[in-house]
Amino acid sequence: MAGLRLRSAGPSDLEWMIGLAAAEGWNPGFDDAAPFRVADPEGFFVADLDLCETLQPGDSDAAPDSSAGDKCAAAAHADNTDNPRTDDNTSGRGSSESSESSQPLPVSSISVVNHDADFAFLGFFITVEKHRGQGIGTALWKHALKHAGARTVGLDGVAAQEEWYGRLGFVRTGATRRFCGPPFSREDGAATIRKVQPADVETLASVDATACGYQRTGFVTEWLADTSTRRTVVRKDLRGFATIRECRGGGCKIAPIVAPDLGSALDLIAAALLQITTDVVHIDVAPGACSLAEALGDYGFSETYATARMYRGVPPHQAPSLFAIGSRELG
């Protein structure tokens, strides 16, 4: 497509991507940008479009673009783009469109975050609605996936798009299920839990890696750093932890939840809820963590939607200690 440029995203672009995700209803946290970027600074991508060089009516690609990430809907089924430019310029503006601007503006995003030498996770796949159906998302998808190299790539995608992802080599292994409900309290395990301390981080990163099946030390280290909108609680024996954060669309998410057993997971949730006041709690129950899903129902939670957990390549070994994922954008 004339006027299309694919490039790495800079810090302002990532803020734009998170804002785009918020507008799509994905409800990201207020302080997500720093830990996301630390996870893999080169793992975020945008497509710029020069509005003065776009195709004339009737020249657009036949297949639709759509969005992914928390919803991870499929991109186009075909790509007829006219050799878009690619570069690694990270000086993106992250701005919204303006009829008065003749500068290229970002219209599509994706992340392919390389957590370690063997595993990457795909998210933030969104094309601005008015620019869907032109093959922009497809071109950016192909460009970004190169970043993963030979790594296994995971994603959370809507079930309706499983067939399309299957054509790209992705295989469903389970479902990530979003549950929403009211805050609750528990007294039984309160004495076993405290706030996270800097000295805990190295051990907790190892605990997280065992639970997820891959190492994401950079992300975890930044994620466990308290901010005004994000707090973490841990078991005193450091066998589990949970992070709560305020979300842009309202309520709080508790993610991830890593614990040696269901009772400890519930105790960590209750302890996290003492750190930030909220009326609504969102928890993305990890694939296979059926016991937590059932227990949340007893506390008045209900499932709001689910996404298919899919992998291209050999899936990482997820341990029973992972009760809730960290995020649908980074896994």
Image (spheres, rainbow, N blue to C red):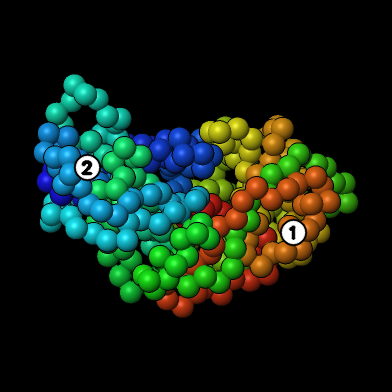
Q: Residue at x 75, y 46 (%)?
A: 301
Q: Position of residue 173 (x, y in %)?
A: 55, 71
Q: Position of residue 20 (x, y in %)?
A: 40, 38
Q: Which of 140/186 is in front? A: 140
Which of the two marks, 2 or 1, is nearer to us in this view? 2
Q: Residue at x 17, y 35 (%)?
A: 51
Name the image quarter holding residue 231. Answer: top right
* Three-letter code, disc 2: Asp
- Look at mark 1 in the image and give the residue it sits on: 292
29 relative to 204, above or below = above
Q: Is residue 301 visible?
A: yes
- Look at mark 2 in the image and give the residue it sits on: 48
Q: Position of residue 323 (x, y in %)?
A: 67, 60
The single residue placed furthest to the front in the displayed view is 58
Q: Residue at x 80, y 56 (%)?
A: 295
Classify mark 2: helix, strand or loop.
strand
Q: Which of 295/266 is in front? A: 295
Classify mark 1: helix, strand or loop.
helix
Name the image quarter holding residue 184. Answer: top right
* Three-letter code, disc 1: Leu
Q: Which of 169/115 is in front? A: 169
Please tell me how crowded label 2 is: few (under 14), some (14-19), or many (20+) other residues with Cα within 10 Å: many
25 relative to 316, above or below = above
Label 1 near label 2: C-beta < 8 Å?
no
